[in-house]
Image (tube, rainbow, N blue to C red):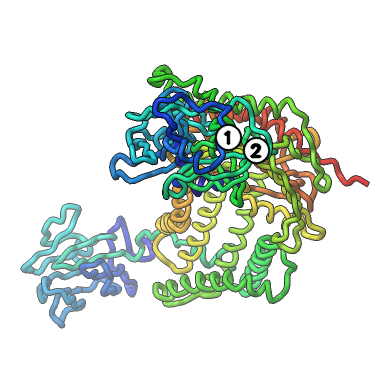
Amino acid sequence: MNASGMESGHPVAATGEPLGAVEVLSRGGHVVQRIAWHGDRLRIGRAYDNDIVVSDPYVCPHHLELDLGPDGPRARDLDSVNGSYAGRHRQRVGELPVRDGLVVHFGHSQLRFHAAGGTLAPTLRDTARHGLLGRLGSIWALLLGTVLATAVLVLDELLAGVDRPTVLGMARGLLYPVIGVLAWAGFWALLNRILAHRANFPVHLAITLFGVTALFLVTHVVSAACFAMAWNGAVWWASLVADVTIAALVILAHLRFAALGNSARMTAAAGLAAVLLFGAPATGDILERNAFSTLPYLEPLLWPPAFQGRTGASVEGFFERADELRVAVDREAGR
Amino acid sequence: MHCRKWRQHTLRWLLAGTVLPLLVTGAGPLQAQVTLEDTADLYARWRDRTVQVQVLDRQSRSRSALGSGYFAGQPGWIVTNYHVVADLANQPERHEARYLSESGREGRLELLSVDVVHDLAVLRAEGMKPTPLELAREAPRKGARAYSMGYPYDIGLTIVEGTYSGMMERSLYDRLHFTGSINPGMSGGPALNRAGEVVGTNVATAGNQVGFLVPSVFVRNLLEKTSEPRAATRSLDETIAGQLTANQSALAERLLNGPMPVTSLDGFDVPGALADWLNCWGSRQEDVPDDLDQIYYRCESQDDIFLSTTLSTGIIRYQHELLSSDDLHPLRFYKQLEDRGYYPRLTLDGDESTVTNYRCRSDFVDAPETALQVTFCVRTYLSYPGLYDAYLSSTSLVENRRALQSTLLLAGFDWDHLNALSRRFVSALSWVGDRP
């Protein structure tokens, strides 16, 4: 016998110790009542003199009862109108032994029994409270994210123009990105508030700031790498994959804090959202690239000479390989 | 106005010419020694030899092009500009051509031959065979009187008195310079000397009394090659493709075998004016941002070959832009260059029914004297197999705050010559550094 009075799956009475927990579930599967059962007679039904009162019009005033018989705990139907059902095939039962995990269907409700010493699934580690993600809620993470995101946004603003930077010009340039960051973080905080009754705005802001930083860095690393190898034709796809990946990770982090569903479902949702987010403009780009134009579709990719990652082809070699272009356009012309 | 532009804008207003009725019915061609005194007499003699050429849409019966033409060569043959009847040549199933004489006679026209390089076409008129005009065998003397005839703006036959001002200078193809008012609608009409001989065919105007004529020697060449009915061994497209290939190959050979003049742009030597018929100019660009200096050098041919309202070919254009900055960080400097690269510096026309899309490839290229990033794009013509257009752009990768961006545009060359010209262009780009 173990501490909870269980032996071979049969609960037995033990002084002061509950045999387990009896749960009544509504039609939708929600637990509407849960009580500890010590082995004494427990009557269940719609009448108010029952130990567990069930508000289900298909349940009899006195529908079924649990008690501790000579062979152990048992459940017994009290000649109810709609009966009680158990087992894989939901057979109508008059009396049956109570074991850990027993489910009895009665009316439109269910009764479930969990033995006190029953096996429980291991405790899930909440990644939103531990590790890197768990530290996002700290003021230091928020501060670091702010510094990094501001740095990359300023750098982006500097790269975009040639004017000498001024405080006013920079502030003007950063206005829209800052609004965008706040709106994005605010959206997730609102969702968090709706779903988990807590906004977690600083955390969502930190996630957004790190996401912006990552997006900038990855985009430029991909661009520099493609330039270094003269992969001009690949930079568009490589950037798209990088953007979608970063966006999926950011959305996944937001979702975990908003406490939605399980991890696999969240990952799929984050991936889908990222694809949709970048997929629409990318589809437009693809259509534009394949549409007829009298202009060549140029994919300029320029970094300073020091970024050149390999030696160039000879002039002769380059133009010999250009023959593939002739083959391609001739094929397009139906030759 | 630029000749090509004029053609594009005024294609629908082409000249009609008239041929003088002979003073005596049934008389032979006008003799060279005949000297006429008065423009009114000239008009009266030649008015029935010049007709209005109309190209009509078969379905709507609306006019898609108007021009002029004159009787020359065999009886019933009419000479006009190719660009007047381009719609008929390109889409014979959708168009038909008709003539309308000054006296009100009209009838169908059949296309017999074309010379797209010199912008000429020969048609056969149904039901009208006046005595053809004679073609002058010698070029006129500079300053000699001349008379251009045609149907400007569809308002009736006109005779314009002017003077020959010699051959057009800096032109790839021979053109006579006519000082007189040639107006839209007169294209294809004749320009006659006082003896009534055709010395040229109206083809373009630059406005302000500056007109251009195709010399009669090219008309004679085309008439000699013309047969009736049109030779069935080659389609019109094949004929045009052959003319373009031959012309462009000869042109490319001249460029490839000629010297390679270079121009210096702040540390770089670049291809300069490769031929005297290329119009080249340079400047310092004012509208670039404050922190970027730009020196700009551009050359382009002036004599595009008209194929249709949406497509011209036989074009050579190139430009060099030298961009530099004193204090911009290299990352910022090259980002500016990248942003400028999204839009092609030079463009060609065309549409989905005439050319394919461009296909491009990019790579680093170690030119003899400089490292470059080169993008080479190619497209081909749907109706003229073996002819290609190329767009080439290159950026030097030698200096942190100074870069040369060169662009070359070639239209209507066979593959080998297209490739050879592009190769030569890239090979001629070199970094020579700052000279003392």
At a point 60% along the width and 49% down the height, the residue shown is: B209
Counting from the top left corner in percent of width and height, residue B237 is at 45, 27
| Residue type, label 1 | Asn
Q: Nearer the viewer, residue B193 or A294?
A: B193
Label 1, on which residue?
A: B193
Chain for disc number 1: B
Say which label, 2 or 1, has the lower sequence index. Answer: 2
At a point 11% along the width and 58% down the height, the residue shown is: A92
User: Going by the picture, which residue comes out furthest to the bottom?
Assistant: A48
Q: Is residue A255 visible?
A: yes
Q: Is residue B78 left or right of residue A221?
A: left
Local crowd size for mark 2, using a 10 Å CA cut-off: few (<14), some (14–19), many (≥20): few
Q: Are marks 2 and 1 in contact (CB under 8 Å)?
A: yes
Q: How many marks?
A: 2
**Mark 1: which secondary structure?**
loop
At a point 53% along the width and 67% down the height, the residue shown is: A129
User: Going by the picture, which residue comes out furthest to the top?
Assistant: B233
Label 2, on which residue?
A: B144
| Residue type, label 2 | Ala
